[in-house]
Image (cartoon, rainbow, N blue to C red):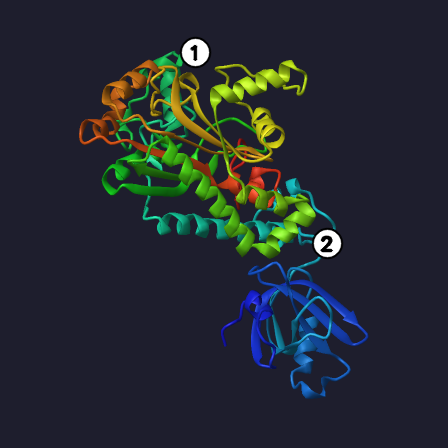
Amino acid sequence: MVPVLIKDLLSSKPEGQQVKVCGWVRSVRDSKGLVFIQVNDGSCFSNIQLTFDRNNPSNNANVNNIEETLKKLNTGASVRAIGALIESPASGQAVEVTLENIECLGTCSPEEYPLQKNKMSMEYLRENAHLRARTNTFGAVYRVRNQMAFAVHSFFQERGFQYMNAPEITCSDCEGAGEMFQVTTLSLEKIAEMGVKAGIGGMKVEDAHKIVDYSKDFFGKKASLTVSGQLEAETMATALSRVYTFGPTFRAENSNTPRHLAEFWMIEPEMAFYDLDDNMDIQEDFVKYLLNWALTKCQEDLAFFDKRIQPGLIESLKAVANAKFTRISYTDAIAILEKDAAEGKVKFEYKPFWGCDIATEHERYLTEKVFNGPVMVYNYPKEIKAFYMKLNEDGKTVKAVDVLVPGIGELIGGSEREENYEVLLERIKSLGLEPKDYDWYLDLRRFGTVPHSGFGLGFERLIRYVTGMENIRDVIPFPRAPKLADF
């Protein structure tokens, strides 16, 4: 008999049918001869209750086996149980299972089990990330993460996008920031020994080539883990029209804030023949689609987050899902921030000025105080944006856009891409990048160039927003950050 998932049992009509339940014990309670075992299998937030009546064992031929098994059960133990699904006489649950037989598959010492009944800190649970999915909080996080991943694919597949897999190893830096993890088969120890022998212990970075011969490396040149699949997605969009990537990306940024990870997942669509306005339209549709999906498919888990993690979460998500996104130029947004700061309406840690990168405090002020809803800021100064963004006619700004939402600030960043070969080449040179590293990317502008746009949404940022979790390390199963690569 195949085990029935608890989420399916709880929605079944109780007719006394025999069912098999497998999962992990949450609690065992013995009350006046009645034994109640709460079991969870992770398929939903709720447990199923298994019951055994010691006062009426005559109908159960396996009473001795059940009694022996009960002695082994503690919180965390795994069980396989068979019994009849009946209507529950207790409040708060529709059905329960009367035990006919139960087997302890794996015992769990209550003295050694890291997940105790008392409240555990998020930091403590990060140290036990291999077990934290068994808690209410993280079981809910990972179920929401699963649903949102499905929603991402559903949105794009419904709109004619092709799913593609961008490479994780690359020889080009999409963002031009240089914060990349190097991939090499060269021995760092041997390179260090060579440096010592060469007497260049105080060697400068630009002199590294004196002892590092990348022609002998696996790829024959310097390679790194990707920070974005965007450039590769653009190549596919110029052949398939609409594509999207959804996979892991890496950033070697030495940051220990609750908003940064070294390894994270990115959703990056690219659309040929889309201008900036088209791009903003689909971004707004995308955010609303995702939030409505969560509100519909994750009701039980969101109710938990609303009650225990962030009160008012559901109403705030509904508000954004039903809102008309305000669209405002960067210049106008900065003017509002400067004016309100000058008039004493708000005090910012970072002074806003034209040319600055809008900080999180600015983003939240715009969404939570000025417009009381989601905001799309577009046309940023070219100096603070990446080389691939299309230059506006003013020569000072690029056709970039950020989607800001109350509570966290930036959720999406995107732009219309520069399709003019000469302009793009000049941008690459002006930022000190090596044009030959982008020959293949420039070819897209030489051979049948087209206007095209795209955007990026950090998946963990989305999950953090939807769940109300404070730290981004708590919305990915095994977080990677400075000095953190456990499990």
Q: Is residue 24 above or below residue 200?
A: below
Say what amino acid the circle numbered 2 marks.
Lys
* Residue occupying the far right of the picture: 32
Tell me if 468 is positioned left or right of 386 in this view.
right
Q: Is residue 428 above or below residue 289?
A: above
User: Which type of secondary structure does the marked residue at label 1 adopt?
Assistant: loop
Mark closer to the chain start, 1 or 2: 2
The picture quadrant where one finds residue 387 is top left
> Neighbour class for label 2 at 10 Å: few (<14), some, many (≥20)?
few
Q: Disc 1 and disc 2: Cα gap in Å?
A: 54 Å
**Residue drawn 56% across and 52% down?**
295
The picture quadrant where one finds residue 392 is top left
Q: How many marks?
A: 2
Q: Which mark is residue 250?
A: none
**Residue drawn 58% across and 43% down?**
319
Is mark 1 in CB contact (under 8 Å) with mark 2? no
User: Which type of secondary structure does the marked residue at label 2 adopt?
Assistant: loop
Residue 333 % position (x, y):
52, 22
Residue 359 % position (x, y):
55, 23
Judged by depth in the image, the label closer to the viewer, 1 or 2, is 2
**Residue drawn 26% across and 29% down?**
441
* Residue occupying the far bottom of the picture: 58
Q: Is residue 183 visible?
A: no
Q: Dot 1 corresponds to which residue?
A: 202
Tell me if 208 is positioned left or right of 406 in this view.
left
Residue 370 % position (x, y):
60, 28
Residue 42 % position (x, y):
57, 59
Q: Dot 2 corresponds to which residue?
A: 117
Q: Is residue 103 visible?
A: yes
